[in-house]
Image: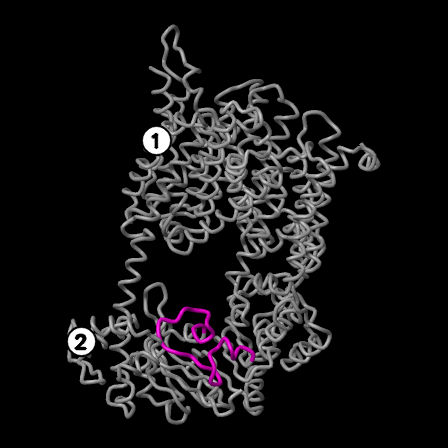
Amino acid sequence: MSSTFAIILTGILVAAACASLGCFLILRRMAMLADAISHAILPGLVAGYFIAQGPSLLAGFFGAALAGLITVGLVELLKNTQRVGGESAIGIVFPAMFALGTFLVSKYYADVHLDADAVLYGNIEFVGFDHWYLGETDLGPQSLWIMGCLCLINLIFISVFYKELKLATFDAGLAATLGFSPILIHYGLMAVVSITTVGAFTAVGAILVVALMIVPAATAYLLTDRLPWMIGLAIAAGAIAAVAGFGLAFMLNGSVAGAIATVTGVEFGLALLFSSKQGLVARAQRLARQRIQFAADTLLVHLLQHEGSPDAAHESTIDHLQSELQWNNKFAQRVLDLAQRRSLVRCQGQQLELTTSGRERSQQVLQLGRG
Amino acid sequence: MNASAKPLAIHDLTVAYQDKPVLWDIDLSVPTGVLAAIVGPNGAGKSTLIKATLGLMPVAAGTVEMFGQPYAKARRMVGYVPQRSSVDWDFPTNALDVVLMGTYGQLGWIKRPSKADREWALHCLEQLAMADFAQRQISQLSGGQQQRVFLARALAQRAQLYLMDEPFVGVDAVTERAIISLLQQLRSDGKTVICVHHDLDSAPEYFDWVALLNVRMIAAGPMKTIWTPENISQTYGGRTQSLIRGAA
Amino acid sequence: MSILDLFRDYTLRNVALGAMVLGIVSGILGCFAVLRRQGLLGDALSHAALPGIAIAYLLTGSKAPIVLLLGAGIAGWVGTLVINRIVRDTRISEDSALGIVLSVFFGVGILLLTYIAKRNDANQAGLDRFLFGQAATLVATDVLTMSILGGLALGCLVLLYKEFKLLAFDPAFAASLGFPPNRLGILLTSLIVVAIVIGLQTVGVVLMAAMLVGPAVAARQWTHRLSVMLVLSGVFGASAGIAGTMLSLGQQHVPTGPMIILSLTAIVTISLLFAPARGLVWAKIRQNHSLNNEPRNREIQPAKGE
């Protein structure tokens, strides 16, 4: 297997493992908690290194997962004291954990390859080098196996607990009454996030794990309303970013991880602008359309309110609309055109009056607004 | 100040919240020296009306004038009491400090409150029988006491027109009496008060003027003429006949 | 290592002074971030500042701190606007928007820094010190730059103290008085960006969040007055800065940034547990005490959670 292929495949697996979890993090508003975990696992890794007396995969995973859960627990604890807001609690706990990790690394392992910047932005470029062997047989790059397993674990976790996750995400109260403990699901999810972070950080680094968890999921959230689609789209967006990111890094001769994160950002930017429902462009168009429609309704309701009252004659002149509703000439004309085209309003010289369908429409509008 | 102008004159006001209309074509003109209630069911847009009046929400169409001027020019004649739940009461400050915020509008940018302003703020607290709590941290006040602090802050604004968002919600009997006597005092001083109010039973007792609102203005005018079973049931969609005891 | 060394040793004095200035500025400005429930905004913005440093270098070829920090400030400010836009115009939550800006901007920063590093251009060395901060490399001109920037930000805060206080407590009331909360909010965030820019050289992007949040949270426990909280927060920040400097420079291999944060964490922990009125230890003792006695009718009821 060529090392380029191994790098790209690892990138895709990291993206899939992260993006699928990310959907739940986005929906549960825990993006920053994931960020906190990604930093806070450092002391856990060091502890694992210390206990195993050297680099050990299992000890590292265990220590990191534990550190992740401790972080989540400490944040909850601080929040529950009512002395600290939730976001401040995160802002206190993870820097403390990261600082502790950095301190331990630099004090006791200054000579070991466990330096903090590798934790931050990883070295996916090297995934081709560390191979696993079974006897004489080359099983392929180690990272590929790790990420493959993690990807599988996450997909199994999501499909087995899909119903529970969905329920706990959208209605924690209901989940609790049905007997699914939201706390258990919360910590379960956080544990999976922690081990995924550990697995992925050797490849892409802590912060870019966060990019792959949050950004493709947020991109998908802008594109669809259905959870299964959201998960699928998030994985696809992450995988595309992995491939395109590799290309970009190759072109610029820069960090692969940084390039992947950059591409996820580009994807998000495109979705933000051009998503057919949530996008800013579509939103601006919709608002402009609604503004005219809404103004026409306002006109109808205005005429209805004053119909038959003594000031009706005065209130329903075209000039009056411009002065009282604060519409400029051109806008008022467009609104009037729309209303007349749909035969909601009749024009008698300067006076406007509702047609039968206009009256029905305005009454309907008031009823709708009430509900 | 234009003496003949109405304290509040709203004309054809339409307000939309995130593309959705919540108030349609509101006409409302409140005369000087009344205690007015804005009454209507949940979701009728009562608080929205107050907020739009104060420019806190964008207005889709229509005009709002206070004392014959747009709000930006009439600010100093208007006092505002937001809903008590709209702020974090764990904020590090005491009751007197909150009341002192009422003077900020008159002070303008950068200038700090003077000793005279502090005395005035203390005086406003006294009006609500809260002088003893001036130095107390606001999270250590009861709900009713917090509400009285908010009213004292509005009083400190030295306004002619007061807009209050649900001042009676969740307060104890002592506070309720204190608010009522304050309202009456304000009326006898010739000020105008407009309150969002949700309790149909007490509305005709506390207020002498009413605006019945449900997305559009159903009826507005002196309590005596407007507070009829027909108007009320029209406002509440005929669902709450049993609630209406005070209706004439 | 003794306090006296701080005055004798030139390097040590610069580092300690720099850490102190950072502690004061971020401690005071952080109070407003914490009170407005924007504790993590600083984290997002400090990460967002990284590409600004790289772009400033690419455009000017200069490594002068003021040029790089200007780039960092502009990038942080752009990050603020992007976060605001996402939160205002889409259904994505503020929490996610912070995470998106943080990770994407940081990724772009890493990409550009590695690109610069591999261009074989000898001049680039040292850009990556902003990642973790290298307080030990602070020289007198750095400290002067930090002091001037911080002084300007604090001056602005003193001038608009009344307005910022009102904004933090009751933005709707502020708006009704004619103080525009949106613009005041952006101004306040810009001041926080200044604090971040100051901190990048000392503690780095990752630990900056704690410099804004920690002192404020600790100070809040000791007082019920905003003015006292601001002063205390500045004092706590400065103490953590000096303590961290002394702890790290006394021994080999121990970086200053993490030691500052660990000192700060100790201050926060002590404050949460033992501060006179709000300390958790006293609350626990009071709770046990009142459980042992008959429940009394209390005139004042705390209004928590309403």
Question: Secondary structure beneath disc 1?
Answer: helix
**Residue C252: x percent and y percent?**
71, 25
Question: Secondary structure beneath disc 2?
Answer: loop
In-front residue for pair A127/A73: A127
Looking at this view, name the residue that lies furthest to the front.
C60
In-front residue for pair A278/C224: A278
- Whether residue C140 is visible to the viewer of this picture, yes or no, is yes
In terms of sequence position, does the residue under pointer 2 or pointer 1 come before the other? 1
- Which amino acid type is marked by label 2? Leu
Residue A244 is tagged as 1
In the rendered image, residue C170 lying in the magenta stretch gets the answer no
- The residue located at (28%, 71%) in the rendering is A330
Is A202 situated above or below A369?
A: above
- Whether residue A68 is visible to the viewer of this picture, yes or no, is no
In-front residue for pair A272/B46: A272
In the rendered image, residue B58 lying in the magenta stretch gets the answer yes
How far apart in space, not on screen, are marks 2 and 1 (Cα)? 54 Å
Q: Determine if marks 2 and 1 fall on one subunit.
A: yes
**Residue A229: x percent and y percent?**
27, 42
- The residue located at (78%, 33%) in the rendering is C10
Residue pointed to by mark 2:
A344
Q: Badge 2: how crowded within 10 Å, few (<14), some, or many (20+)?
A: many
In-front residue for pair A219/B144: A219
- Which amino acid type is marked by label 1? Ala
**Residue A332: x percent and y percent?**
28, 74
Which chain does the numbered disc 2 sit on? A
Which chain does the numbered disc 1 sit on? A
Q: Which residues are magenta?
A: B51-76
